[in-house]
Image (cartoon, rainbow, N blue to C red):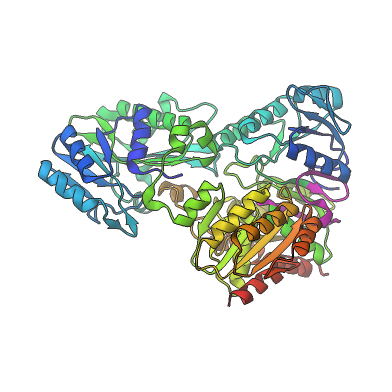
């Protein structure tokens, strides 16, 4: 789960990371009230998960209440590269002496958190990595040991930070690492990490990605949402606990297991079709989950045919069949379905479907035949 | 021969009394797996269809001689159960549970590696099937027969699909190993390919990967340098939309975008033929084994 800037900053602040004082606002009046409370100059920042906010006019400095109102009116509701701005973050303006970069990455390859620090912050860090890789200091931290003071010193000296901030930068990295572990993040990126003219170290931006599997332990994080970034079908799927990604095509896809679903998309595409979605009903899906999945798939008006590709291990094919039968009873779909069932309890599942004799449901024996059939039916 | 599970396996199931735990344990036993014990704290002394239930994994080792553990408990308890199995000295721990938090997986991986006495497969994996010998996990065994192809895969259901396509061409399997699709799997492609290379029954290895991470790229280089047996690859996700970027830092770390095309090219550059569909994989296997 990716957080908005202000959600990330609030999370970091909770963990003791210094961030500029600010408030989130959903209306112009709220934004103006926030600005009045913070004082001037302050900055009004659009809250959308996309780069280039500044260039698009989504970040503006306000020197007085009139400007705060003017900028909030302009930014709230603005479209930034396809995303509508529903919230702004109003924060005190900072006097910046230097812009650094810091991040903590969950490095799957090394199986350890990786801490990065650079004095070349405030710009595209990928470009820095390409052009001047030595400008980024990197250090893996043993997750069983945790972040030690020496880690902070090494990174600070390796990156070549100003000498007077070696200790504060080390302390900042330790706090970011603490937040990374305590909040169970997959990524914390601060760009820029600023040194103010009075030599304070602060996080001026925050990009935080949290581990969805750990949200049960963090109810305050689980409750966060980003209204600008939610497709109606994806939201519906999320409420039903299904993994769904909307695509551009017209063939609805349901499968079990991410790998098989991805493979199904590939095979449908090779057969000349265009998938409308990725939907992984997950392991051990019960009939209700299948019914809910059909509902989500058919809520996309572009869908002309649906493919069920199930190879049951922990998922039982009879549960899938029951779910589909129930979906037909509830939703009465008008588009054709192609169903391929193999694996645990497949015979029972196929028999249930055959006995139910659902209209316009076609059974196929293999994944390839099912893909070819659904492409034909969607024409 | 086969790898990891076979006739020597003495299985204990952690979470045996849950609905799914019971169902799959009995499936495994029906297949011929030697299931010696189950563990559910507080239910010691009971039995599940004749399989003794203990309170701790240590008891299952002391009293029933368990040497392999299957973890079937809900995600918030699974890491603890895996650590308990490791502490009890169980050599092979197969974690089926899906949804263990990534930071817990990081600690599990590093702890188990530093102790060096147990091997963890999974989490979030379908288990291991050695056809004709033993099945530990949720792989629907009736689709597979004994044979010479070793399969290692990140995805459960896709593993069944590929095994099924091979079966339709008349090929059986030495072992099918699902390593799981989580960010920090206990064992990776390389660990399993090393075992298949040493296994006399295995004549050809199929490795099935998917988008994300760089484990396929690493395995490809290992295969080029260390594996003499033919390897056939598959990657799922050619048409998948690019996943949400994990910030810019993610790309810096892996040095690759983790796309299907990049992975397939890396594998082909190391001399591994890659089938673009599960059916194509089976066709390449048939060509290579001259059937």
Q: In the rendered view, does B242 fall on the left or right side of B9?
A: left
Which residue is rendered at x = 51% and y = 61% of the image? Answer: A299
**Rendered image quadrant of residue B39:** top right
Q: Nearer the viewer, residue B233 or B42?
A: B42
Q: What percent of the width, then of the height, locates residue A227?
A: 38, 49
Nearer to us in this view, A334 or A276: A334
Q: Position of residue B188 (x, y in %)?
A: 65, 45
Q: Residue at x 46, y 38 (%)?
A: A222
Q: Is residue B135 magenta?
A: yes
In magenta segment, residue A201: no
The part of the chain drawn in magenta is B129-156
Query: In the picture, residue A251 is in which quadrant?
Result: bottom right
Whether residue B269 is visible, yes or no, is: no
Q: Quadrant of the C terminus of chain A?
A: bottom right
Place of residue A310 in the rendered image (x, y in percent of width and height, measured from the top left): 69, 58
Q: Is residue A344 visible?
A: yes
Q: Is residue B270 left or right of residue A23?
A: right
Q: How many marks?
A: 0
Say whether residue A307 is left or right of residue A276.
right
Q: Position of residue B45 (x, y in %)?
A: 83, 22
Q: Residue at x 28, y 44 (%)?
A: A26
Does residue A14 lie above or below B278 as drawn? above
């Amino acid at each position: 789960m990716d957080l908005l800037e202000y959600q990330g900053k609030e999370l970091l602040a909770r963990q003791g990371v210094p961030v500029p004082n600010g408030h989130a606002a959903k209306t112009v009046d709220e934004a103006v009230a926030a600005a009045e409370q913070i004082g001037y100059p302050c900055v009004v920042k659009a809250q959308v998960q996309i780069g280039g906010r500044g260039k698009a006019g989504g970040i503006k400095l306000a020197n007085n209440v009139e400007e705060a109102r003017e900028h909030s009116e302009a930014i709230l509701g603005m479209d930034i590269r396809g995303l509508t701005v529903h919230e702004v973050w109003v924060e005190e303006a900072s006097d910046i002496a230097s812009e650094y970069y810091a991040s903590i990455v969950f490095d799957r390859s090394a199986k350890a958190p990786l801490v990065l620090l650079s004095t070349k912050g405030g710009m595209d860090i990928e470009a820095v990595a390409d052009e001047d890789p030595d400008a980024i200091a990197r250090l893996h931290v043993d997750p069983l040991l945790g972040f030690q003071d020496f880690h902070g010193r090494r990174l600070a000296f390796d990156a070549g930070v100003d000498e007077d901030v070696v200790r504060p930068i080390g302390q900042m990295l330790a706090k970011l690492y603490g937040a990374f572990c305590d909040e169970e993040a997959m990524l914390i990126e601060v760009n820029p990490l600023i040194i103010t003219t009075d030599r304070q170290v602060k996080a001026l931006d925050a990009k935080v990605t949290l581990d969805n599997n750990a949200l049960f332990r963090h109810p305050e994080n689980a409750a966060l949402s980003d209204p600008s970034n939610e497709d109606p079908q994806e939201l519906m799927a999320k409420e039903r606990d299904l993994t769904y990604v909307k695509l551009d095509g017209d063939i609805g896809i349901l499968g079990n297991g991410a790998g098989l679903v991805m493979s199904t998309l590939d095979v449908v595409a090779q057969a000349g079709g265009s998938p409308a979605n990725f939907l992984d009903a997950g392991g051990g899906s019960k009939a209700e989950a299948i019914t809910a999945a059909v509902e989500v798939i058919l809520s996309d008006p572009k869908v002309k045919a649906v493919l069920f590709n199930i190879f049951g291990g922990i998922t039982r094919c009879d549960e899938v069949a029951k779910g589909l039968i129930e979906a037909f009873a509830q939703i009465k779909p008008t588009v054709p379905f192609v169903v391929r069932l193999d694996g645990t309890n497949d015979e029972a599942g196929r028999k249930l479907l055959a006995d139910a004799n659902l209209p316009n449901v076609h059974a196929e024996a293999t994944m390839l035949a099912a893909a070819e059939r659904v492409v034909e039916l969607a024409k | 021969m086969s790898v990891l599970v076979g006739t020597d396996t003495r299985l204990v199931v952690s979470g045996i009394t849950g609905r799914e735990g019971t169902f799959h344990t009995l499936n495994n036993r029906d297949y011929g797996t030697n299931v010696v014990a189950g563990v559910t704290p507080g239910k010691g002394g009971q039995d599940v269809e004749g399989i003794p239930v203990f309170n701790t994994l240590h008891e299952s080792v002391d009293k029933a001689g368990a040497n392999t553990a299957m973890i079937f408990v809900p995600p918030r308890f699974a890491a603890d159960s895996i650590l308990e199995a490791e502490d009890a000295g169980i050599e092979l721990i197969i974690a089926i549970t899906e949804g263990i938090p990534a930071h817990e997986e990081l600690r599990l991986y590093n702890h188990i590696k530093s102790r060096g006495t147990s091997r963890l497969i999974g989490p979030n994996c379908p288990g291991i099937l050695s056809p004709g010998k033993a099945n530990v996990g949720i792989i629907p065994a009736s689709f597979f027969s004994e044979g010479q192809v070793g399969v290692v895969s990140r995805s459960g259901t896709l593993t069944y699909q590929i095994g099924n396509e091979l079966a339709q061409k008349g090929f059986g399997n030495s072992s099918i190993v699902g390593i799981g699709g989580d960010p920090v799997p206990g064992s990776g492609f390389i660990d399993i390919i090393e075992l298949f290379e040493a296994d006399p029954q295995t004549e050809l290895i199929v490795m099935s990967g998917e988008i994300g991470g760089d484990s396929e790229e690493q395995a490809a280089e290992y295969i080029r340098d260390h594996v003499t047996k033919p390897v056939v690859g598959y990657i799922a996700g050619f048409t998948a939309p690019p996943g949400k970027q994990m910030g810019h830092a993610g790309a810096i770390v892996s040095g690759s975008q983790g796309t299907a095309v990049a992975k397939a090219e890396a594998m082909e550059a190391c001399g591994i033929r890659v089938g673009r569909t599960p059916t194509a994989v089976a066709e390449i296997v048939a060509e290579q084994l001259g059937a």
